[in-house]
Structure formats: C-alpha cells, structure tokens
Image: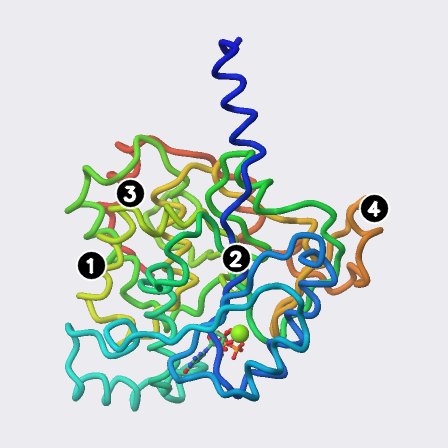
Amino acid sequence: MAAPNEAANKDNSMNKPIRAALVALVRNSDLNGIRSTIRQVDDRFNRNYNYPYILLNDKNFTDEFKEGIHAITKAPVHFGLLSDDHWGLSPYVTEEKVKSALEYNKNRYIYGGSYSYRLMCRYQSGFIHKHPLLQDLDYYWRIEPDVNYFCDIPYDPFKYMRDNGLIYGFTTTPMEIQKTVETLWDTTRKWMMENQELLPEESFVRWVVNEKGDYTRCHFWSNFEIVDLSFYRSEAYESYFQHLDRAGGFFYERWGDAPVHSIAAAMLLRKEQLHWFEDIGYYHPGLRHCPNKPEMAARCICGPRSDFMYRSICNRRFGNVGNVPKNETLLLAQMPDKR
Ligand SMILES: Nc1nc2c(ncn2[C@@H]2O[C@H](COP(=O)(O)OP(=O)(O)OP(=O)(O)O)[C@@H](O)[C@H]2O)c(=O)[nH]1
Ligand SMILES: [Mg+2]
C-alpha cells in the first residue's frame, strides 16, 4: 500500500489540469474541411472541455481562414506558421535525385509524384512536436480536415491516457502500401543495431515484424492519434527520425508519418502503453471504424456494417502478439526484410 504522502501526491497528479490540445496541419484551402472536423470534435467531446485547437500552416493563414475557424468554435484557437528549417527538403538528399524519384513514382502509388506531400510527411514525422505552440503541451490529439467523429465521447481521452500510463492512442490500423516503404524496415533494422542502448528491455516490436523478420506494414493511421509528446521528444525517437532523414526515404520513396510513428511506437514502447480507442467511431476517406459493442454503439450515429477494424489483419495482430525482450528484438533486427 502507498504511504499516505505518496497517495496524496498521486491524487493530486490525477486531478491536475492536463496540458493538451487538438492539433492540425492545414492549408488555407482546407477551411471548410477543418471547420467540419472541429465542429464534430466540439459536438462529440470538446464542448465540455474547451481544449485549445492549434492550427499550423506552411503559409500565413488568411483572415478569412481565421474568422471562419473562430466562428465555428468557442474554444481557444492558436494559429501557427512553420519555420523554414522544419518545412523543406532534407539536407541529406539531392534535388536532382528527388526530382527523378518523383518522376519514377508518380504513377506507382497515390501522391507518388507529390513533393508537398513528402514535406508534409517529413514534417509530421520529425518536427510537428517541436513547434513552439506545442512546447508546453504534454499530449496532442491530431485532427485532420474532412474526417468524421461518429460517437459521443463522454469522458476525457487525454485524462484516460494519463491515468492509465498510455503513450499512444489510435483508432484504425491499416497496412501500408509496400511501394511507398520499400527500404523503411531495412533502414530501421540498421538503426536498431547501431543504437542498441536506446532500445527498451521489452517492446511491442512484433506488431511490425513477423517471426521471419519481415516488415508487416501494420501501422496506426496517424490522421488520428493521441500521443504523450514526451515520446516524440525522447532521445530514442529523435535519433530514429534523424537516421531515417539521413537515409532519404521521405523523398526518394514516400515514407509516411503513419508507418514512421508506428514503427517507433512498436519498437520503443510496450503493448500496455498503446491503446485502441475502440469506442471512438471515426472516418477518414478510405477507412471507417464504427464500434459494434452495444454499450459503445448506443452513443454512435454510424452502423457497424462496413466497419474496417473488425476485419483488419493488423488489428487482429495487435490483439495476438505480445511484448518481446530486447535480445529477441535484436535477433529480428539481424534478419533482412525479404519482401
Ligand atoms: N499547410 C499544409 N498542410 C498540408 C499540406 N499537405 C497536406 N497538409 C495537411 O496535412 C494533413 C495530411 O494531408 P492529407 O492530404 O490529408 O494526407 P492523407 O490523409 O494521407 O491523404 P488524403 O486525406 O487522402 O488526401 C492534412 O491535415 C492536410 O491538411 C501542405 O502542403 N501544407
Ligand atoms: Mg487526410
């Protein structure tokens, strides 16, 4: 049993206000889409809490944009501009090679030829948590334009994360398109071998690598994520991001922030620190999750018929695999990805 003082401290920290915000990277042209999202987040959850919204852009937000946002929510809103050293070409790649990679990939997969999409993925992987507007936050909840929140959320997910020692929360778990991440796992393996002291004693890495050493491409779809930001600020995460950036795959391939965040979470955290918000019904173009448990479904306006998560191979894998000790992780890291 905890000593009385410890118990009092614990109670105190449980009741302390949470430094958290809903954060989106958006363009001025996303005004309608992000208004729709904010309205739903307010209706479903935030009208009871008034967590601030932080909207970030690589260009100055227009007055029309700012007015449009203030008109839809009474929560505080902060508008931020990205700095040039965060939004741009990686210093480790050459323009010529990037140009030919975009040309080569333009018809191979969605956004294969898009330069700005790659800037966005690199930014969300390595820089968003360093924006000055996020520096005092303990948690962020990422939102995007044109998504739907189907269910009332009658509690505070940030508090739920904190009170349960959770680091990463998600709603959907798709499988990444192979061609966008051809060398991501081999690059990751290299980092693990070179930075063994940064690996935890136990991790959930088996979610992203199978027993043969092949990358499963399972990832948390990061257009929704609730994260304890100390994770992205950690030495291990930063070292991993720098290693990926040096390898050039954000530009030469199309490494997304979703597989990057997810590999990092699986490799550096334990299963108990990850949480599926099954009760948060969610839609982003392409995938839809609608809870089927009666007590959850009662709070939702969707039907579970075309739900993704109850058929998702990666969600099943999330349930089936457990933590592995570091020596096993290192054995897996020595196996080349044969796919
Ligand atoms: N400021 C800014 N935001 C961007 C840019 N590109 C994408 N974003 C934002 O980054 C987030 C992810 O971009 P999306 O285009 O939604 O990428 P996605 O979710 O992979 O794909 P779709 O939703 O299918 O287009 C969204 O919040 C976008 O508004 C950009 O060039 N500038
Ligand atoms: Mg999107």
Amino acid residing under circle 4: Pro
Residue 243 numbered mark, or none: 1
Amino acid residing under circle 3: Leu
Residue of label 2: 21
Which residue is rendered at x = 15% and y = 72% of the image?
A: 92
Whichever of callouts 1 and 2 sits on the residue coming sooner in the sequence is 2
Locate residue 203 relative to residue 164 in the image: left or right: left
Mark 3 to mark 4: distance in Å? 40 Å
Locate residue 166 relative to residue 35 in the image: left or right: left
Amino acid residing under circle 1: His
Residue 332 numbered mark, or none: 3
* Residue in front for this viewpoint, 303 or 163: 163
Q: Position of residue 150 (x, y in %)?
A: 74, 62
Mark 2 to mark 4: distance in Å? 30 Å
Instruction: Note whether 249 is above or below 104 in the view shown.
Output: above
Q: Residues within 10 Å of mark 2 (few under 14, many from 20)?
A: many
Which residue is rendered at x = 40% and y = 88% of the image?
A: 107
Residue of label 4: 294
Mark 3 to mark 1: distance in Å? 19 Å
Whichever of callouts 3 and 2 sits on the residue coming sooner in the sequence is 2
Whichever of callouts 2 and 4 sits on the residue coming sooner in the sequence is 2
Which residue is rendered at x = 49% and y = 71% of the image?
A: 55
Amino acid residing under circle 2: Ala
Instruction: Note whether 175 is above or below 28 in the view shown.
Output: above
Instruction: Note whether 241 is above or below 35 in the view shown.
Output: above
